[in-house]
Image (cartoon, grey):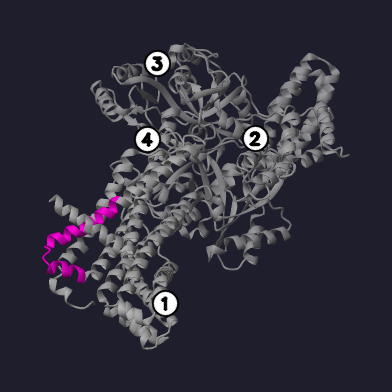
Amino acid sequence: MLEELKVLLLVAIRNLALHKVKTIVVGGILLVGSFLVVFGLSLLGSIENTMSQSIIGSVAGHLQVYSANARDELALFGSGFFGRDDLGEIEKFEDVKAELLKHPNIADVVPLGFENAFLGRGNLLDDLFERFRSTVKSGVEADTLNMVETIKTNLRTVRSDLENELKISSIPEDIKKQIADVEEALSDNFWMRLKADPESVLLFLESRIAPLSGEKEPLYLRYMGTNPEQFTQVFRKFKIVSGENIPAGERGILLSQRIYETQIKNIVARGFDNIQKGTVEQRKKIADDVALRTIASDLPKQYLETLVYLNGEQRKETTTLLKEFLKTDENDLETLMKNFLTVDDSNFNDRYEFFYKTIAPQVRLYPFKVGDTINLRSYTRSGFLKTVPLKIYGTYQFSGLESSDLAGAFNFVDMVSYRELYGRMSSEGQQELEALRKEVEIKSVDSGSLEDALFGADAVLESRASESNTTTSTTTTAASPVMEFKRLQTGSYNPSELNTGMVINAAILLKNPRLLATTRVDLEKRLADAKMQLKVVDWKQASGTLGQLVTVIRAVLLIAVGIILVVAMAIINNAIMMTTLERTREIGTLRAIGAQRNFILRMFFVETLTIAVLATFLGSVLAALFVGFLGVRGIASPSDFVSFLFGGPRLYPSLSPTVALVAPCVVALLALIFTLYPAFMASRIAPAAAMQDRE
Amino acid sequence: MWTFFVVAFRNLIQARRRTLLLGSAIAFVSLLLLVLLSISKGVSDRLIEASTLTSTGHVNVAGFYKQRSNSATPLITDREKIRALVQENISGLALVTDRARGWGRLIGPGGSFNTGLNGLILEESAFLKEVKLAEQSEYKKDGSNKVLGKIENFGAPNTILIFAAQAKKLGVDVGDTLTFITEANGGQANSVDLTVAVIARDMGFLSNFSVFVPRQTVLDLDRRGPDTTGAVWVYLKDISRANEVRLQLEGVLRKAGYTLLEHDPRPFFFKFQKIVGQDWRGLRLDLTTWDDEVSFINWIVTSLNGLSVFLVIILGLIIATGIANSMWMTVRERTKEIGTLRAIGMQKGQVRTLFMIEAALLGLLGATAGCLLGLVLISALNAAQIPINNSGLRVFLMTDVVKLALRPVHLAGALIFLPALTALAAFYPSLKASQMPPVQALNQGK
């Protein structure tokens, strides 16, 4: 037996040496095939690994629990809709947590709930009139007169704005009335009243004029309610960048540093940041790169954003500084700024530096800062629009995922505020509301001043479209009847409320993540036994479309590898067939001198096996070396989205030993299978064939 | 030359077994190539179909109207005039229409989400007849497999067409009422009640973000006058002319006195922030092509095409080595024959040509067979309407049944590429063969 194997091996080696081209071709194909399989699977495995860490370490945890009555599936990173998913409710989080913690593998359970909000940005006139009110109250005449001039300038702008509106409006009469209001506010008669009856002037300005200046486009924010302190402890990648975490018992919001920098920051500063990133980090040139060129050509058009917040003093100072920097005699600040913002590859670095050193401190780089209060507007589960003012306590990021929009998608609010935005009051609030409801004042607010009501810092306000006097048949109406009542809660609440009461979903952290699958099944059973209608899903399922994307990538990659292997095998089969044809005489001779069919079969198999084992393992070793090399050097992420999959700006792939061992064996086995037919054909060759001439 | 073909063909017939072997390998490969190409073409066709229905024309004359310096309304005035300018100056038009654009929250009994409103002009929306309607079971648990609404019901004032996934989310059926409420329009929140006239089948995730209503509904909601619209959508007979037409229109509109924004190849809703920051007021036009408006999902098609190219290259390499090997063996096997040919006076170059023609012929035969098989397979797959059950795949492939698109150019490509590849693979072996002295060749043959 052993003796025969030795002979077969010798024959195989001789044959391989004899048919060099065939050997090289078959070997080469097997090598490439095995290289691709090992490399592809290692890369895929590494991406799945880093991505799972990104998802688990940011908001998902290992498992997620939510109501079994949910109509939608939990999709933490978006379900493909811009709205609220129906995920049901976990009525009493404390009970669920207690039940879950009984399982020995559970490290912690974090309450969650998420939703989209939009942020009203207020309008300039509101600020102006507010300051005017206090100036008037202070009684310094010179200041008041000064401000009247500023107000008049602004009113002229509003008037021409309204004239623009008139051109596109279907309700010109209303707009004309608004213009008449502005005209009145511009008239001397109007200001004559200031002395005698300041309140009527102020009221007219605040209620009739302020709403006309309109609001900036809203900013959409995705927020997640949680227990902030617990969240920080459990999710280790979570880092506060500026400010502090939301303290227990306080209402507030933590903004994502990523959103703060890429969506909230002054657009001119963002332009500088993006060009800086492109030219310095990615070593691109403004002149060569379309995206950078677009940003650069947009920059001077945004000059107003740097000037709008400057007062007279600052304007003068900025003018001087810019004149000095640009070495020009130009005195007009607008022109100076436009010139300054016209950047190219040669002047960018200097201007970037000058902007941040000199201009930025004068400009409001962020419309709101840590410590400010913002009004978060959101739809309650029943479609009401609700506004809750929240203090910004700080900004945060996930370490390693700083540049990922996905990881930075959430802004965190305390669970109590979340419930309020969701349409649930805290227990204290409910009692207060009950008491207040008896004397609640329902009044209709003019639709124009809706925003005032919304933005009154002390008003919680709800309006529901379908309850307004909407007509179904003809046209539309303003959703106006508005219920307004005094703000119920102050900033604080009982900290225990963070962990009790209604939540939407909860993240479960495991002590031993390797037992994830069994723990999930255990938990589902446990919850069912406790008569809790909840379901438990793993992080991948909980991540929604994102998780599916990876499934799709995996499927596509496997199909690609499959196709390559099939073709490779077809070609190998073909090559062996061809050699068989060529070797008819040789095989015939072998048979004639007494070789059995079995021997011929085995001869072919050993031949394939020898080359296959050599080639596939060489391929695997090469792939391993390549992966190792990339593991040290890293693969740069081509986009911010991919950096989430990579778990950071670079992917350091690692080799899976199982893949490196099993893949070449599988490829070799496939090669053997595809040798079957040619080998069988060869074994059928009659000894007489040796005598005949070739085909 | 003809003789060469005849001889080559005879050679192939004579070595029937080898021809069959190698030919079937080539046929298989060409079949695979065709299927690959038609998958990636199928996906990009779906993308064009879904996007030109829900979010863009082939070329769009859109723009922004700034009432205030800090606003950015995606709206244009002079609707009639701009439409007339397009009609007069552009040839090869299939349709010119315009759609009013609205934005806000759609609220149903089961849930709510933000969506864009597509205000349609009914008389110019013949495509509606082609829209596939959803069976009740697609959006309702335990629903029947009947289609409830009729497309004719859509178009009455305050009717709405939504897509299956949206209906599921909102928890509504045909005939139910939805509320739409606008957002962020200078502090006004206007609302309207809309009756669900029809529920259409999903078209990937593009259809999640838009619903269809009559044009007047959008105008009423936003209080816009009759000569305003969101964008003029230009459909061409030949979509590949989109960029050329965009450039042509830029000239036409500039000449007509309009100010144009610099071309920015992104969808309009990515441009709000940048427009808000600019200091001009009034109207500026923004011309885009369909692929600008869907550039944020074009990566699906790009990566699929990239993958196809990668696969074709790897496969091409494998096939080329395989064929080269076979050719090599053929030549060696036929050394004697070559010696004979040379001995009776054939020139070196002629031998080489003969072998290469033989290889090309073999490639052509194999490729033809593969293409025929591919045609049959692809039509069979399309006819079978195989449903895609994985929701992730549905989203990324933008269809719910397997749809492959075969282009004549793919067939032609396969029929040229493969014979060229085989001929090329045969080059070195035939060079070697032709260089052998006839005497040696004759001797070696034994």
Of residues A81 and B73, the one drawn nearer to the viewer in this rendering: A81
Q: Main secondary structure of the magenta part?
A: helix
The crowding category of the residue bearing disc 4, from other C-alpha atoms within 10 Å (few below 14, some 14 to 19, many at least 20), is many
Element carrying mark 1: helix
Label 4 in the same subunit as label 1: no
Magenta residues span A585-613
Q: Looking at this view, name the residue that lies furthest to the right.
A: A329
Q: Give, as a three-letter code, the residue at label 3.
A: Thr
Whether label 3 touches label 1, CB < 8 Å: no
Marks 4 and 1, Cα distance to the nearest angstrom? Answer: 63 Å
Disc sitting over residue A540 in the figure: 4
Res A499 seen here: yes
Q: Is residue B227 above or below residue A509?
A: below
Q: Give, as a three-letter code, the residue at label 2.
A: Lys
Disc sitting over residue A500 in the figure: 3
> Counting residues from the N terminus, which is met first, the one under dot 2 or under dot 3?
2
Residue B340, horizontal then vertical, whole percent: 33, 84
Marks 2 and 4, Cα distance to the nearest angstrom? Answer: 38 Å
In the rendered image, which residue does mark 2 sit on?
Answer: A216
Label 3 in the same subunit as label 1: no
> Counting residues from the N terminus, which is met first, the one under dot 3 or under dot 4?
3
